[in-house]
Image (cartoon, grey):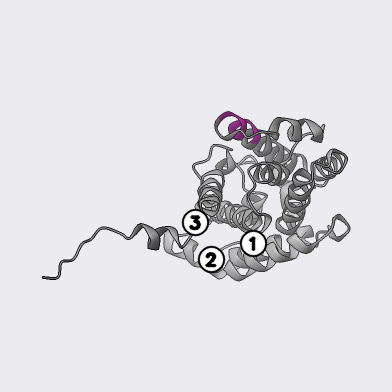
Amino acid sequence: MLTTTNEPNPAAVSSGMTEGEAKALYRLMTWLSPSFPVGAFAYSSGIEWAVEAGDIADAGSLRGWLAAMLIDGSGFCDGVFLAQSHRAASEQDGAALREIAELAAAFVPSRERQLETTTQGRAFIDIARAAWNSPGLDATIAACDAPIVYPVAVGLVSAAHGIPLAQSLHAFLHAVVSNWISAGSRLIPLGQTDSQRVLADLEPEVAATARRAGAASLDDLGSATFRADLASLRHEAQYTRLFRS
């Protein structure tokens, strides 16, 4: 008589992902989750001023603003810094790490954006060391000898844990865009469904930016989002604010 069982086949289950791939996915999902306590929810990257100024008024204008920030602004630049710090940490190149950390810290366009990225970077490093430390991570952090901004922090911690660059980049940019959308949804405001539509619409741009940033050098750094930079500057003097940037 034939019998059936609902028990999974261990060989079939394990064949889809190696142990290393499973660890990498688990850690990226944890580190770049909204629940990971780096305080990202407190920052809008200037989106709050853009909403008040009328540049962002609905899902369509939010999508356009974020696509520009991602492709031609801070999204791409942060991706380059992550990629470069990941490679330098993987190669244990302390001199390159110092150069990248210093340049990344100097590259932000406003005081509030400086606060945003350094605060999140410091929190990411502190929590990673406390809960997810790995051999060599302390030496890698010390080699930077400069304030560690958020993308550099993610790059060097991912490298210390042996997580491939491509996955780290994609997960990081997804997290950044998701936080931007979360800020926009509270400010416009948007419903949950419209917010998810914006995130879905930006999927190709996230993937393309991750590929481009991964192939770029420090010489390719550059921004063409003057209006977004202006928003981060004008937010400092905004009368009523929900966010710190």
Q: Is residue 93 magenta?
A: no
Q: Residue at x 51, y 45 (%)?
A: 30
Q: Are marks 1 and 2 in contact (CB under 8 Å)?
A: yes
Residue at (78, 51) in percent of width and height: 84
Which residue range is magenta in the image?
Answer: 125-130
Q: Quarter of the image containing the C terminus? A: top right
The residue that disc 3 covers is 189
Q: Secondary structure at mark 1?
A: helix
Q: Mark 1: which amino acid? A: Leu
**How far across and how far down the image is residue 188, in percent?**
53, 57
Which residue is label 1 attached to?
66
Instruction: Give neighbour class at mark 1: few <14, some 14-19, many 20+ (Cα, 10 Å).
Output: many
Q: Residues within 10 Å of mark 3 (few under 14, many from 20)?
A: some
Estimate the x, y position of residue 210 in percent, counting from the top left: 68, 62
Q: Secondary structure at mark 2?
A: helix
Residue nearest the viewer, comparing 145 with 158:
158
Please report the residue visible at 53 percent of the width from the left and 52 percent of the height from the top.
Answer: 25
Mark 2 crowdedness (10 Å alpha carbons): few <14, some 14-19, many ≥20? many
- Along the horizontal axis of the image, is 7 left or right of 123? left
Q: Is residue 89 visible?
A: yes
Residue 183 horizontal side relative to residue 90, left or right: left
Q: Amino acid at mark 2?
A: Val
Give yes or no for residue 128 being in the magenta stretch: yes
- Tag 2 residue: 198
Q: Position of residue 146 (x, y in %)?
A: 81, 33
Q: Earlier in the sequence, mark 1 or mark 2?
A: 1
Quarter of the view holding residue 134: top right
- Residue 173, how many percent across, how many down? 63, 56
> How many marks on residues?
3
